Image (cartoon, rainbow, N blue to C red):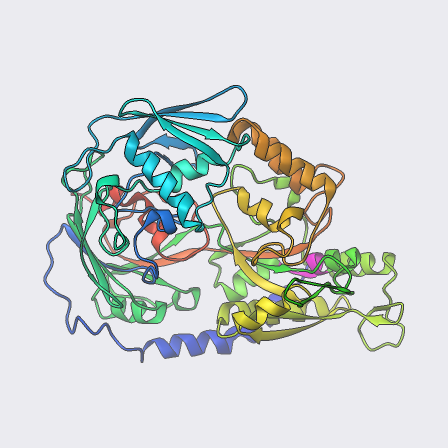
Amino acid sequence: MKHSRCMKAIVLIMTASLLLALSAGCTGVEKPTRQEQRPAQTKDELLLAIGAEPEDGFDPTTGWGRYGSPMFQSTLFKRSSDMSIANDIGEKYSISEDGKQWTVQLRGGVKFSDGHPLTAADVKFTFETAAGKGSTVDVTNVADISTNGDYEIIFTLHEPQSTFITLLTTLGIVPKHAYSGDYAQHPIGSGPYKLIQWDKGQQVIVAYNDLYYGDKPFFKKMTFLFLSEDAAFAAAKSGQVDVAYIPSAFSKQSVNGMHVEAVKSVDNRGIMLPFVLPGGKTELGHPIGNAVTADLAIRQAVNYAIDRAALVEGILEGYGTPAYTVNDGLPWWNPDTVFEDGDIGKAAKLLAEGGWKDSDGDGIVEKNGMKAKFTLLYPAGDMNRQSLALAVADMVKAAGIQIEASGKSWDDIGKLMYSNAVLFGFGSQDPIEMYNLYSSKFRGVDYYNSGYYSNAAVDGWFEKALLARNERDAMEYWKKAQWDGTTGVGVQGDAAWAWLVNIDHLYVVKDGLDIGKQKIHPHGHGWPITDNIEEWRWLNE
C-alpha cells in the first residue's frame, strides 16, 4: 500500500538537520567583495547572481550555451516555451527525402556586434570549428557543409539524424573574421547582448547589442555576479541583486521586496543500478557488475518502494516533481512509464516472486545465500543528494533491502560506478541523452551507461528514432524505447534506473520584475533562466 503520512514525516525529520544547517549557515556567508553597498542603477539595468562562472569562457564551439541561451551569439533556430521549433537567424529549413541533407535559409541583414554581416560562411565556419575541437558539441555525423550564396547553408549527414535539429537550436554562431585563440574571453556575436567587461572569478558585465535584429530587450545593461547559492542568497537578503538562484533549503525564508520563482525542469536525480553480473573489468581495470542489482526483482522492488512524493515534500520543500524517466514532460516522454510508487506491498511481492526471502529473520531478504545489500554512492558534499540517498535507504528497508549510502569524490565514483549504484543528476532538452544513458553503444562511456545496460529491443527503437527523417517522426520510437508494451527502459521493463525527482529551479526575483514564460529547464541550475532574456521587463513599464 502507499506510504502513510508517517513515512513522509520520517523523511522530514531525517533531513531537517541538514536543511537547518544550510539555512543557519547562509546568514554568515561572505557578501560580494565588489559591492559593499548596491551601486546606483537605472530601471533598465539589472544585477544578477544566477550561476557559476563558465570555466571555458563563452565559446559555443566548446559548449557555451548548450544548456540555456548563448546570449552573446545567435542560433539558427530556437525552442519556444512549449518546446516547439521557432526561427532565429534561420528563416526555414528543409530535409531531403533520405533524411541526409538539411538545407537552411538564413534571414538577411543580421550583423555581428562589430558591424560585420553574418552569412552562411560564418555558419559553415562555426560547425567546422566545433568539429575540430572535439568537445561536447557532437557534429561527428556531419559529412559535408556547403553554402549557396550568402544566405543558404547545406548540411550533408553520414546518415539520417532526427536529433540534428538540437544542434541547430543550441550551437551559437561565431564570426569567421573575428575568431581567434582568445575568442572565449572576448566573444563577438549577433545575440541580444555583448560582453563589456569580465572580471574573472567575480563578475561579467553585458550591454544591449544595438545591432541586434530581434525584439529589443528592455534591459540595456546587466551585471552577473559569480556567487555560490548561499552567497547569492545573502546578496539578495541585503538588497544587492535583482535575481538570485537559491537551493530549496532557503525557499521558506522571506526576502524583503522579492519573491520566489519556481521553474519546472528535467534536472533530475536518479539511481543508476548496475545491470550485469560481476566478473568483467573496464579497460582501466575497474570492476563491472553487481550481483544484487543485476536481479530484475531487486531493481523493480527498489523502484516501487520509493515514495517520490515524500522525497519532493521532505527534501525539496515541495519544489519539484516525482521522476519516472530521464525526460519527464518533454515531447518524447512516454507517460505510460508512470506507476504507483511508495508501495511496499508491491515491492515485497516482486521480491518473493523473484526468489528473495528473509530466511533468518534479520529483516534483509536473501537469495541463494546472497543478502539483498548494496552500496549507493553519491558525491560527497552534495547535501541534496546525501539527503535523497539516506531517505531512499530508509524507504527500501521496509521491503527487506539494505542500502548503504556512501559519499565519495567524483574521482572515486569514476572508478566504482561500474559495480555500484550511483545517485546521478542528468536532464537535457535533447532525446539523445536517453540514448546515451541506455544504448548498448554507450556501455562504460564516460558517466553515461556505467551500469552496462543492454536490451536489443530498446537498441532497435533507438536506431529507428535516430534514423527518422525528423524529430516528429522519431517521437513514437523514443517513447517505445521507454515502454513498448512488452519491454523498455522503464520500471515495467528493465528498471535499470530508479529515477527519483525533478528539481524545480528556484530564484528569488525582485517584486515587479517579469522574467517571461520559461520553458522547462535542463540540468544545471542557473544560466538556463536567461534563455528568454529578451522577454524580461518591469511590469507596467
263 vs 427, nearest the viewer: 427
Q: Is residue 305 magenta?
A: yes
- SS assignment for the magenta stretch, majority: helix
Looking at the image, is 523 positioned above or below residue 203? above
Q: Is residue 97 visible?
A: yes
> In the image, residue 27 lies at what x, y percent?
32, 78
> In the image, residue 17 lies at what x, y percent?
50, 78
172 vs 324, nearest the viewer: 172
Q: Quadrant of residue 225?
A: bottom left
Q: Quadrant of residue 24?
A: bottom left
Q: How many marks?
A: 0
Identify the image quadrant of the C terminus.
Answer: top left
Taking 193 as reference, is 333 left or right?
right
Q: Is residue 81 visible?
A: no
User: Residue at (36%, 24%) from the top-left corner?
Assistant: 92
253 vs 473, nearest the viewer: 473
> In the image, residue 332 lies at what x, y percent?
55, 37
Q: Quadrant of residue 227?
A: bottom left
133 vs 11, nearest the viewer: 133
User: Residue at (74%, 68%) from the top-left corner?
Assistant: 398
Looking at the image, is 262 positioned above or below residue 466? below
User: Residue at (32%, 38%) from the top-left corner?
Assistant: 125
Toward the top, the furthest residue is 97
Identify the image quadrant of the N terminus.
Answer: bottom right
> In the image, residue 319 lies at what x, y percent?
46, 58
Q: Is residue 331 magenta?
A: no
Taking 232 as reference, is 458 left or right?
right
Q: Which residues are magenta?
A: 302-307
Looking at the image, is 391 positioned above or below residue 195? below
